Image: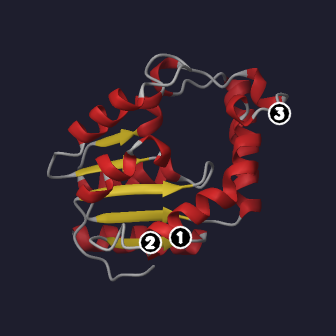
Amino acid sequence: MTHRMTALRRVVVVGSSGSGKTTMASKISKALGAPLLEMDAVMHADGWNSASDEAFRRTLGEFATGDSWVIDGNYTGHGVAEAVWPRADTFVWLDPPKGVVMGRVIRRTLRRMVTREKLWNGLTEPLSNLYKRDPYENIIVWTWTRFEGTRETFARASGDGSWAHAAVYRLRSKGDVARFLDSLTLSQN
């Protein structure tokens, strides 16, 4: 963690697939009593078809005008850095090791397939997540091939001034996450 706990109002939770973004964002949202927006739900509002960059940025930008909110997701190539990042007062970067992330993604994908768990907008994990080699059709391959690039993107953002206006918490372990959540709970009481 790079800053002492300050009042969080507008929080962006980032990290690779399987890093725990949705779980963390949900806990922060609940602790703050702030609305939560999952970028995946916006991007995949029309089934597995991606929203246009314009519609995606517009929805995120409108949500991020509020006084208090939590947004989880990356989508840095779709204008998130311009639409959301300048409005955030806090970045929570979940950055566990690749082995941890891969184990989570594989277990999560298998669980979702077996239980037919509903994701955003009623979607379910496609069976292609088990056998296709195209990262755009297989979240396991996506995570494996994008892990280092995702880490580099957020390391660059935390060092190049993109996040200089906000508190940045880089959480690399379960212990880091637990300490952050404990601090959040204590600071909200």
> Image quarter for residue 63?
top left
Q: Label 1 to label 3, Cα distance in Å? A: 28 Å
Q: Earlier in the sequence, mark 1 or mark 3?
A: 3
Q: Where in the figure is residue 43, as x and y percent of width and height?
A: 45, 30
Residue at image x 21%, y 37%?
Answer: 62
Q: Amino acid at mark 2?
A: Ser
Q: Nearer the viewer, residue 1 or 135?
A: 135
Question: What amino acid type should be assigned to the residue bearing mark 1?
Answer: Ala
Q: Quadrant of residue 9?
A: bottom left
- Relative to 28, does residue 127 appear above or below in the rendering? above
- Image quadrant where one finds the C terminus: bottom left
CB under 8 Å between callouts 2 and 1? yes
Distance in Å between CA atoms under marks 2 and 1: 5 Å
Q: Is residue 97 left or right of residue 41?
A: right
Query: Would residue 130 appear left or right of 65 to someone viewing this image?
Result: right
Which residue is drawn at the image coordinates 46% and 16% (left, top)? 46
Residue 74 visible in the current orientation: no
Q: Nearer the viewer, residue 69 or 133?
A: 133
The residue pinned by badge 3 equals 133
What is the crowding at mark 3: few (fewer than 14 residues within 10 Å), some, or many (at least 20)?
Answer: some
Q: Badge 1 is on which residue? A: 155
The residue where tag 2 is placed is 158
Q: Residues within 10 Å of mark 2 (few under 14, many from 20)?
A: some
The kind of residue tagged 3 is: Arg
Spot occupied by residue 71 in the image (x, y as percentages of width and height): 36, 47
Numbered marks: total:
3
Farthest-out residue, left: 67
Look at the picture and state if 19 lies above or below 1.
above
Q: How far apart are the two marked residues, 3 and 2, measured between alpha carbons?
A: 32 Å
| Camera-nearest residue between 82 and 139 | 82
For residue 82, say whether it is visible. Answer: yes
